[in-house]
Amino acid sequence: MSIEINNESGVAVHEEDLLKLVRHIMERMHLHPETELSIIMADVENMEKLHIEWMDQPGPTDVLSFPMDELRPGTPERPTPAGLLGDIVLCPVVAQEQAVAAGHSLAEELLLLTTHGLLHLLGYDHAEPEEKEEMFALQRELLSSFLGKAAPRETMQ
């Protein structure tokens, strides 16, 4: 697995924890070992620009996902073929605000947001109630299995 993390946010982040989480999720979702992923930590200004450009929404957001090869989860018998999963862009400043509101650490919020972003890259969404239930249940299960405890409370809608 080729996972690149680029921190352009100016905020110290536990990158090794994010790498371990992504490897865990990629294995659980049966992605090919040569799947590529990029994680970018953006500052507020750049995240706001991306949010306006791609989502037509004002202000910065916590996480954005940009899928590339439209890979979907595999199975043990049929793993996903090798490919470029895409980019996850996180904004640690926004994540810190959400972490305080949720009563957990920035590290936990970034794990939650990374999981959320990765599931979006794999085709999951939460626009409809059924989709949200499926995506958020899987998000909790993946985080809990990684952490060995209950996942942090979700702050996203």
Image (cartoon, helix red, strand yellow):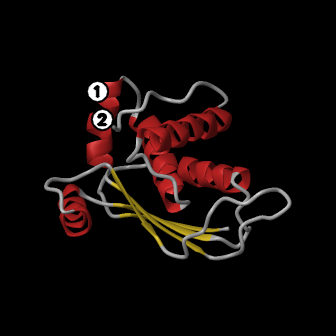
To which quarter of the image does residue 76 belong?
Answer: bottom right
Q: Position of residue 70 (x, y in %)?
A: 54, 71
**Residue at coordinates 57% horizontally, 52% vertically from top-left?**
16
Q: Position of residue 29 (x, y in %)?
A: 69, 54
**Residue at coordinates 78% horizontally, 57% vertically from top-left?**
75
Marks 1/2 in contact by CB < 8 Å: the verdict is yes
Query: Is residue 57 visible in this depiction of the protein?
Result: yes
To which quarter of the image does residue 52 belong?
Answer: bottom left
Which residue occupies the foreground of this view, 87 or 81? 81
Q: Is residue 106 left or right of residue 151?
A: left
Report how far apart the C-alphas of labels 1 and 2 lie in the structure: 5 Å
Amino acid type shown at disc 2: Gln
Q: Is residue 56 left or right of residue 132?
A: left
For the image, the number of numbered tags is 2
Name the residue carrying label 1. Answer: 101
Q: Which mark is residue 88?
A: none
Query: Is residue 14 visible in this depiction of the protein?
Result: no
Q: Is residue 148 above or below residue 129?
A: above
Check disc 1: other Cα within 10 Å, few if <14, some if 14-19, many if 20+.
few
Q: Is residue 41 above or below residue 135?
A: below
Name the residue carrying label 2. Answer: 98
